[in-house]
Image (spheres, helix red, strand yellow):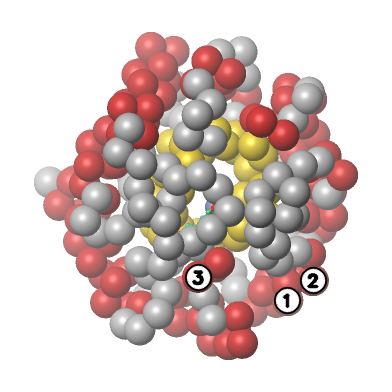
Amino acid sequence: MVQLAPSVLSADFSRLGEELNVIEKAGVKMLHIDVMDGTFVPNISLGMPVIQSMRKVSNMFFDVHLMVSNPDNIIESIAKCGADGITVHAETCTHLHRTIQNIKKLGLKVGVALNPATPINVLDYIIQDIDMVLIMTVNPGFGGQSYIEKMTQKIKDTRDMCNRLGLNTDIQVDGGISPKNAKEVIEAGATVLVAGSSVFGENKEERIKEFCKIFEEGRK
Ligand code: DX5
Ligand code: ZN
């Protein structure tokens, strides 16, 4: 099954509760939440208090994407704020295997993200332990960037790796995803499509419907 995970980074933060309400009513089950520290990426987004507030008004699966230099320091607090899944960047974890186990011990789903330049062989010895691989399809840090075409091959290579190992691991794609390239990434093997600027703004319901139509067509 393919699903959409709207990225809250592109929401209107002055009306956050309302924004979440609209997308949840439109059928969205997973919310992608970008946490940035201004060090690993040159931007700062939101943190614990905002996640906690959002948790009070939403039942969506909170998929937290940590773009921070020292994720181990905040994993437990992020979990306490109401995250359902945490994704860490392989580039930020000196002891990636240990970090994965720590997230699992908290009872959360775990994902590992790879920047565009990071090869997929970093997954070789840990892929069996994780629920999701996040293939960054832009360099992380900002919404509204263009999809890096070369990443289509990387999605295919990751899907091949999973197939070879008999794994059904989710492959999430994040950055520059819109109804225009949704079919391309799904055919390559992506199962979770993060979309920020192509969902939030005017006509959210229409945009979500557009994605869902593409998912339906892929199922036929
Ligand atoms: C970028 C973030 C994304 C971002 C995607 O570093 O990880 O989740 O919100 O935004 P769009 O869909 O606009 O490229
Ligand atoms: Zn993200």
Q: Amino acid at mark 1?
A: Ser
- In the picture, the disc for residue 49 is 2
Q: Nearer the viewer, residue 24 or 122?
A: 122
Ligand 1 under 8 Å from disc 3 Cβ:
yes
SS category of the residue bearing label 1: helix
Q: Amino acid at mark 2?
A: Pro
Mark 3 surroundings: few (<14), some (14-19) or many (≥20) residues within 10 A:
some
Q: Nearer the viewer, mark 1 or mark 2?
A: 2
Residue 49 visible in image: yes
Q: Amino acid at mark 3?
A: Ser
Q: CA distance from mark 1 to mark 2?
A: 6 Å
Where is residue 50 shown, x and y percent of the image?
73, 72
- In the picture, the disc for residue 201 is none
Where is residue 11 shown, x and y percent of the image?
52, 75
Q: In the rendered image, which residue does mark 3 sit on? A: 10
**Residue 198 placement, left or right of 134:** left
Where is residue 54 shown, x and y percent of the image?
67, 74
Residue 110 visible in image: no
Quadrant of the drawing holding the N terminus: top left
SS category of the residue bearing label 2: helix
Q: CA distance from mark 3 to mark 1?
A: 17 Å
Which residue is drawn at the image coordinates 23% and 66% (left, top)? 210
- Kindly indicate the quadrant of the structure image that contains residue 52: bottom right
Q: Nearer the viewer, residue 117 or 210?
A: 117
Is label 1 in contact with label 2 (beta carbons under 8 Å)? yes
Q: Nearer the viewer, mark 3 or mark 1?
A: 3
Q: Nearer the viewer, residue 108 or 35?
A: 35
Mark 2 surroundings: few (<14), some (14-19) or many (≥20) residues within 10 A:
few
- In the picture, the disc for residue 53 is 1
- Vertically, is 26 above or below 165? below
SS category of the residue bearing label 3: helix
